[in-house]
Amino acid sequence: MKVVILAGGLGTRLSEETSIRPKPMVEIGGKPMLWHIMKIYASYGFKDFLVACGYRGDVIKEYFHSFAFRSNDYFIDLQSGSCEVVNRNGSDWRVGLIDTGLNTMTGGRILRLKEWLEGVTFMVTYGDGVGNIDIRALLEFHRSHGRLATVTAVHPPARFGALNLAGNKVCEFTEKSQTGEGWINGGYFVFEPEVLDYLSGDETVLEREPLERLAEDDELRAFLHEGFWQPMDTLREKQQLENLWQSGAAPWAVWLEKVETARVSSSALF
């Protein structure tokens, strides 16, 4: 099953970082946000990606073109130029890097990938949001309701800390990561191929007419995710994600949990 990642926007609200690179290539813990999102999917066995490039797509293409050389250990014969890989990084992903236009809208970017998506169920998400979403449970939910589309509903993250007051006395200050109230579109969609018929051209904004029509046609369901989810829309949010990563307790790093579980299970055998 293919995973489409929308990575072509201008990222104007994060202009401090995006003047020279697309937002999905802004780094958290020395790795692009795009890599973190792909690791979430890959940890559940979904490793066939289509990256919808646009603004500074060359940066994304160059990153993956040289990925093996940066991630593996190898010997180079300086006379012949031949290269022998000795320690592989273990990433068995297949990544399609497709230019979907500079000014194309979200729905239009998906439509431009139609030739690779027709006839199959596929997943879509944005290139700037991470969460500890159980992708397997998401897919099972989608298959259970039999509709054309599923969106992952998340609680909006709090933009500011919360004050617990008694009069003018501050009893408690908490830097909350989620408000716990309301639901918003968190991406992490699952679509049947018929969803492509709801898209009309480059100007199509997925979040407007297509999703609205799917809802009107009773073809859209929401997978309720109560756990962590965080976009990277501002420099402050980037720093929040960086702090979580550096703390060693990044909630979205589900692949680390799986490695630790496997290690413990293996140790229990001896």
Image: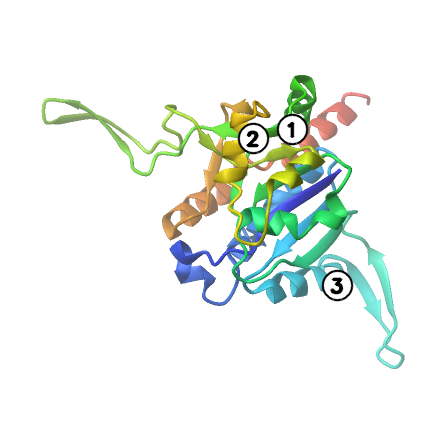
In the picture of the structure, the residue carrying the numbered disc 3 is 69
Closer to the chain start, of discs 2 and 1, is: 1
Q: Which residue is mark 2?
A: 214
Q: Amino acid at mark 3?
A: Phe
Viewer-proximal residue among 207 and 84: 207
- Residue type at the position of mark 2: Leu
Mark 3 Cα-neighbour bin, 10 Å: few <14, some 14–19, many ≥20: some
Q: Quadrant of residue 69?
A: bottom right
Q: Which residue is mark 1?
A: 148
Decide which of 203, 192 is in the foreground and name it: 203
Residue at horizontal 64%, vertical 33%? 190
Residue pictured at 75% horizontal, 49% vertical: 115
Q: Position of residue 168 (x, y in %)?
A: 10, 27
Percent across and percent down for residue 116 are 76, 48
Q: Pointers 2 and 1 in contact (CB under 8 A)?
A: yes
- Dot 2, how many residues are within 10 Å of its Cα: few (below 14), some (14-19), or many (20+)? some
Mark linked to residue 178: none
Q: Position of residue 252 (x, y in %)?
A: 56, 36
Locate residue 268: give its quadrant: top right
